[in-house]
Image: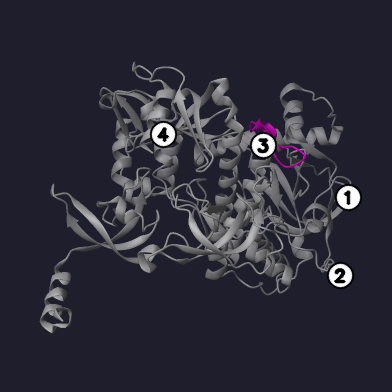
Amino acid sequence: MFFDDPALKELKKSFDSKKERREGMVRASDRGFGFMECPDRKSYFIAPNFMKNLLHGDKITAIITEDNAGRSQAEPETLIESALERFVGRVHINRFEGKVKLCVQPDSPTIKNSITCDDMREDKSVELKEGDWVKCTLKKHALRDHSFRAEINAFITTADDPKAPWTVSLEALDLPLDCPKMPEGLHFNEESIEREDLTALPFVTIDSEKTKDMDDALYITKEDDGSYVLYVAIADPTGYIDENSELDKEASRRAFSIYLPGRDIPMLPRELSDDLCSLREGEERPVLCAKIPVSAEGEVFSDKTVFSFARIKSQGKLIYNLVSDFIEKGSAEGFTPSEEVSKVLHILVDFTWVRDKYRSTHAAPFRNPPDYEFVLTEDGALDHIEVNYRRIANRIVEEAMITANIACGDLLAAKFHCGIFNIHAGFDPQCTRDILDLLRQEGYEGATAENISTMEGFSAVRRFAAAQESSYLDSRLRKMQEYSQISVEPAGHYALGLKNYATWTSPIRKYGDMINHRLLKAMILNSPSPRLPDAGTLQVMNLARRTNRMAERSVRDWLYVDYLEPDIEKKTVFHGEVFDVVRGGLRVTLQENGAMIFVPGSLISDDKTAMEFSAQTGELLVNGKCALRLGDPIEVRISEVNKLTRSVVGCPAAPVGGLKLPDPEHVRSMNNRRR
């Protein structure tokens, strides 16, 4: 009867109102406890008995209390947003005392809870087995509903499917598994438009050997005064695809072709991307062509650039490595270009060095890291990884595409003040003080908050960093830059040192380039502009770009774990580079295959007090002295792979900073005991 007493209820309400409540994100540990991280960066301990009702990544409110030692801790009260809603996972069939319980282990490196599930699939023709991959929806959360429970909505693939890394990664992000279907009766819609006949000119494509969707071809002339006229011919899919068609809507939803290790998923039907629109050798194709004047010093004259409808016939499907061998060595096995093509290639080389020199003095330079090609077996498993360094042929194409996109960006900005622009705002303003301190420390003079916020100042800083023997300064500065964005309005691209930058050179692969094609066509024909991109278009494109990168990273991580596992026993020594310094260790990139591994402090030394990992300065200090910093080389071995979290752990192959290396086997066994 006391529970119904109004006075007691009021007293309890008064007590509750005086309790401190905070909102934050749950971070789980490997040892059962967790933390609630708040927006003001304060962190509160969550005891194991409370963590049983939580998932890593949950957004909650909690009551802040103190334990007997006076330490603050969080007692979860309400769920604001669950870390899991729709997810993929692996089937676990729990059999106990003759009963069978269906569970799913979410495919997440941070969520170790196995969740009881109900099979709610519409199609149950495939019997679920241990380890199968499925798509699920969380229906009950323990903090809100006193227990976790989910529904299985769809079967993805079997436990032993060698193609699981690709299929599961795509399904997890709701990305398409294949290209769109080719509509019946699709035909070229621009037969009535007069096109300039450029079929006699020796245009060439330069791509990798396996490339089928060739969307750019190059030709160039050199004038008597040393200047150049660069011809860039781009495939014309918008000649086939009406902007109000279902195929255009599908392309806009996808926004980009998806490029995964060893596999690609085109934005357009393969009949278009790999055939009708592909600039195949010896086959006539309609194109959108730009004739771009470039001075002998490398300046691009956008205002004198001429865009036109044209027809070309590629006179060579050239391959990066063979072109590079031909240019660098004078010959290439299996590649003997005609005299005309050879002349074009040599002028393109001259043009490339001129543009490179111009950018190195007027704009911001950029790195040329190698590409890593994942070569698969016939059944779809990873066979090996090839390192493709960016040689002269790659740089030719890169400089030509940048030049073409400069001209497009300037013209769209002047004509429409609208289009799909790539923008970059330079340094993060919140990092200004740290940047100025760093530049002073590294010997850069004259930097102020005002001048490093301008494109000229930003470019000057980047040029200074690129000229240093060590990549430390460049690596530090990159971590204090804004991210590049896609915009419907023109704005500067600080990372390239350009006032405007709008891509139009990959319309087979990017929907934004299709939009820019239509704007360029309207400009050429002096006709009403097509439907202009809006905020909705922008949102879809930015989201698609982000999710596509997540899918690529997911597949890479998955493949690297299997690929590097044999190197534990082999004790292979890899050449690495310090990519990041984080609390408790180093993130290292392996030069041989591009893998990112973690080297924890526990595998560098047993003496924790001797080491300080400074994320702010990007340094590992040993007894107060810098032993390693961003960009430094380090030789490492693979110590452990975790297939559940798809992570790779490494250890130094030689002592760091004079410290004695611990025994990796002993460290691993100690970690397993703690877990």
Residue 387 sits inside the magenta stretch? yes
* Residue kind at label 2, given as amino acid type: Gly
For label 1, the crowd category at 10 Å Cα-Cα, with few meaning under 14, some 14 to 19 and many 20 or more, is few
Q: CA distance from mark 3 to mark 4?
A: 35 Å
Q: Which residues are magenta?
A: 376-396
Q: CA distance from mark 3 to mark 1?
A: 29 Å
* Residue kind at label 1, given as amino acid type: Glu
* Residue kind at label 4, given as amino acid type: Asn
Q: CA distance from mark 1 to mark 2?
A: 22 Å
Residue 370 locus on image (x, y percent): 60, 33
Q: CA distance from mark 2 to mark 4?
A: 62 Å
Q: Secondary structure at mark 3?
A: strand
Q: Secondary structure at mark 4?
A: helix
In the picture, the disc for residue 283 is 1
In the picture, the disc for residue 185 is 2
Quarter containing the N terminus: bottom left
Residue 422 in view, yes or no: no
Q: CA distance from mark 3 to mark 2?
A: 37 Å
